[in-house]
């Protein structure tokens, strides 16, 4: 059996006013996505173009030159960091004679590979159908042929494209009903939980260490070094220590616990179809008593990742809810950075917990914060700048540079 992965070539558009560094960062993340999908990346290229072509997205000459570079290294697939229409994908495939997919399609492929449960498979299938429905005309030109004709009763009849659209619509409707039932079941399960036990949701950028933190707190979960390793919500009970304050000598001594839920990770340019399809899964985030926002402290794009997470939280309905749903920022994997870099993080994110799930650093501090949730929410506090979306200097861009100035969100 041939286990050699399929080779792919990455491309990204760069406008006349766009800097090179952000484009390179996007290509680096696209590289991780391709590897997570089981592909072998053999090259990448930035295509500079002042205006996007409505027919081919890039210029025909650029695609021809790109094809030569990709074929020279044995690539069979072109992966574009930008979202393409169906007609644009077909045009690029026609000019290059290679398979072409955009970032959204790649993420959907990863979700299809990771989906294990019936609910996750239904959510991914719904997102795929919603993505493909508006692209049917551009991708399947042969579907414009009519099913009727001369000699047939009922006239010319509907086109095959219309038939295909109707089938897609029926499947989407059925999946929405199925997921709506799942949502009602989840709501019933939540209503049966004890209100005395706080419910905490782990949210953050994909592969930042959410499952590792779940394992530290509850002993459950199997961390994997993969993007989108977790699609289904996993809820476990965490023991936070005895109900006793050494300073005052007060407390019953009984164990304090909370429910911790691990959820699907977020990512830059997360397809809106997936956000909508995973609404039943992400409802655990909206209805939780507190949020633990987890980011990779060693990432070169820490602030950009934080911006993506906060925007996605707003998209799913977690906005202006800071009093009833407090949240704390957790900067994980600080064991991978230097002490000066940790000091920079402490200066720009003073309310965050610096953590290493690898060796348990910061776990006790997090448990102390969680204990304040019982019997009620934490005391009123001043919101952090990242919660409000204020402008602040960015933390280190890479290990060699310390601080660079950035505009506000």
Image (cartoon, rainbow, N blue to C red):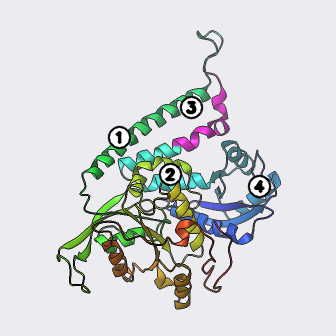
Q: Could you say which disc has been placed on residue 63 in the image? A: 4
Please name the residue that numbered disc 3 is placed on: 165
First in sequence: mark 3 or mark 4? 4
The CA distance from mark 1 to mark 3 is: 25 Å
The reply to whether callout 4 and callout 2 are in contact (CB within 8 Å) is: no
Rendered location of residue 215, percent (x, y) = 33, 71
The CA distance from mark 3 to mark 2 is: 22 Å
| Magenta-drawn segment | 129-148
Rendered location of residue 40, percent (x, y) = 58, 64
Q: Could you say which disc has been placed on residue 275 in the image? A: 2
The CA distance from mark 4 to mark 1 is: 46 Å
Q: Is the magenta stretch mostly helix, strand or loop?
A: helix
The reply to whether callout 3 and callout 4 are in contact (CB within 8 Å) is: no
The CA distance from mark 3 to mark 4 is: 31 Å
Rendered location of residue 194, percent (x, y) = 23, 57
The image quarter in which residue 139 lies:
top right
The CA distance from mark 4 to mark 2 is: 32 Å
The CA distance from mark 1 to mark 2 is: 18 Å
Please name the residue that numbered disc 1 is placed on: 181
First in sequence: mark 3 or mark 2? 3
- Crowd band around label 3 with a 10 angstrom C-alpha radius: few (<14), some (14–19), many (20+): some
């Amino acid at each position: 059996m041939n286990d050699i992965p399929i080779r792919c070539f990455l491309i990204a558009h760069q406008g006349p006013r766009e800097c090179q560094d952000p484009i390179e960062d996007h290509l680096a993340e696209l590289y991780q996505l391709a590897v997570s999908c089981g592909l072998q990346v053999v090259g990448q290229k930035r295509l500079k173009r002042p205006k996007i072509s409505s027919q081919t997205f890039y210029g025909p000459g650029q695609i021809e030159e790109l094809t030569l570079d990709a074929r020279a290294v044995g690539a069979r697939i072109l992966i574009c960091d930008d979202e393409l229409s169906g007609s644009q994908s077909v045009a690029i495939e026609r000019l290059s004679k290679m398979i072409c997919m955009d970032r959204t399609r790649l993420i959907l492929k990863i979700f299809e590979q990771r989906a294990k449960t019936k609910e996750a498979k239904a959510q991914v299938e719904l997102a795929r159908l919603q993505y493909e429905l508006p692209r049917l005309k551009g991708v399947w030109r042969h579907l414009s042929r009519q099913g009727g004709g001369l000699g047939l009763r009922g006239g010319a009849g509907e086109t095959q494209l219309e038939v295909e659209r109707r089938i897609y619509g029926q499947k989407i409707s059925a999946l929405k009903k199925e997921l709506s039932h799942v949502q009602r079941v989840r709501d019933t399960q939540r209503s049966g939980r004890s209100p005395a036990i706080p419910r905490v949701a782990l949210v953050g950028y994909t592969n930042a260490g959410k499952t590792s933190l779940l394992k530290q707190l509850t002993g459950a979960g199997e961390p994997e070094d993969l993007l989108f390793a977790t699609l289904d919500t996993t809820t476990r009970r965490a023991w936070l220590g005895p109900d006793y304050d050494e300073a005052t000598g007060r407390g019953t001594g009984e164990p304090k616990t909370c429910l911790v839920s691990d959820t699907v990770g977020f990512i830059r340019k997360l397809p809106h179809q997936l956000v909508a399809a995973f609404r039943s899964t992400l409802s655990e985030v909206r209805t939780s008593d507190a949020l633990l926002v987890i980011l990779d402290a060693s990432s070169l794009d820490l602030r950009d990742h934080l911006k993506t997470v906060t925007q996605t939280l707003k998209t799913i309905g977690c906005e202006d809810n800071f009093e009833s749903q407090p949240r704390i920022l957790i900067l994980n994997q600080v064991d991978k950075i230097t002490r000066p870099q940790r000091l920079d993080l402490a200066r720009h994110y003073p309310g965050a917990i610096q953590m290493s799930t690898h060796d348990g650093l910061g776990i006790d501090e997090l448990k102390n914060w969680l204990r304040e949730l019982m019997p009620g929410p934490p005391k009123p506090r001043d919101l952090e700048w990242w919660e409000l979306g204020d402008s602040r200097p960015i933390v280190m861009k890479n290990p060699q540079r310390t601080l660079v100035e950035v505009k506000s969100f």
